[in-house]
Image: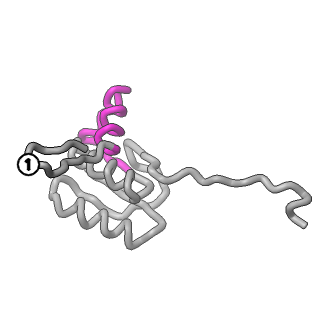
Amino acid sequence: MRRNPDGSWHGDMFDGLGYVTAMQNKGCDPAGKTALLVGAGGAGSAIAHALVMAGVSELAIFDADVQRRTALVDRLAGLSRCPVRHGSTNPRGFDIVLNATPEKRIEKRTTRDRK
C-alpha cells in the first residue's frame, strides 16, 4: 500500500507475480507450457492470473468449490490470452502442476479422546 499525492491509496497483490518469478528464478519458465493449478482461492487466483500473463499455452484449474472455479476460469478465459478450462486433480499430460490449496491440519487424537 502507498498513499498517492492526492491522498488516495494504491495497493497491489504480489502472490501470483512472486510465485511465477520464483519459478522462473529456479529455471521453470511457464511460457509455452501447459499448466494445471489446483486451488482457486485468493492466492490461487493470483497465481492463475500470473501464469496466464507469463504466457502459458493452456491453463486448467481445479477447485472443489465449483462456483469459485467457474468464476476464475471465466474471468481468465475472458482475457483471450490462452485457453483456460476446468481441470481435475489428475496431473497427467501437463508440463507444470501447481498446488495453491491450504494445508490440511489433522490433529492427532489420543485413545482417551476417542472415548
Task: Name the secondary structure under disc 1.
Answer: loop
Q: Quadrant of residue 23?
A: top left
* Residue 49 image position (x, y, % from top left): 27, 51
Does any portion of residue 68 appear in the rendered image? yes
Question: Between residues 105 and 12, which one lies in front from this camera angle?
Answer: 12
Name above or below for residue 9 compared with residue 72.
above
Query: Is residue 31 on the magenta stretch?
Result: yes
Q: Is residue 68 left or right of residue 58?
A: right
Does any portion of residue 51 appear in the rendered image? no
* Residue lying at 35% horizontally and 32% vertically, measured from the top left: 22
Name above or below for residue 22 compared with residue 82.
above
Q: How is the image coloured?
A: one colour
Q: Is residue 19 left or right of residue 91?
A: left
Bounds of the magenta segment? 15-36
* Residue 37 image position (x, y, % from top left): 40, 52
Q: Quadrant of residue 31?
A: top left
* Residue 26 image position (x, y, % from top left): 37, 26
Residue at the extreme bottom of the image, as rendered? 67
Which of the image's four quarters has the N terminus?
top left
* Residue lying at 29% horizontally and 63% vertically, measured from the top left: 73
Name above or below for residue 45 compared with residue 69.
above
Which of the image's four quarters has the C terminus?
bottom right
Residue wearing tag 1: 6
Residue at the extreme front of the image, as rendered? 7
Q: Is residue 112 left or right of residue 3?
A: right
Question: Between residues 103 and 10, which one lies in front from this camera angle?
Answer: 10
* Residue lying at 40% horizontally and 61% vertically, measured from the top left: 87
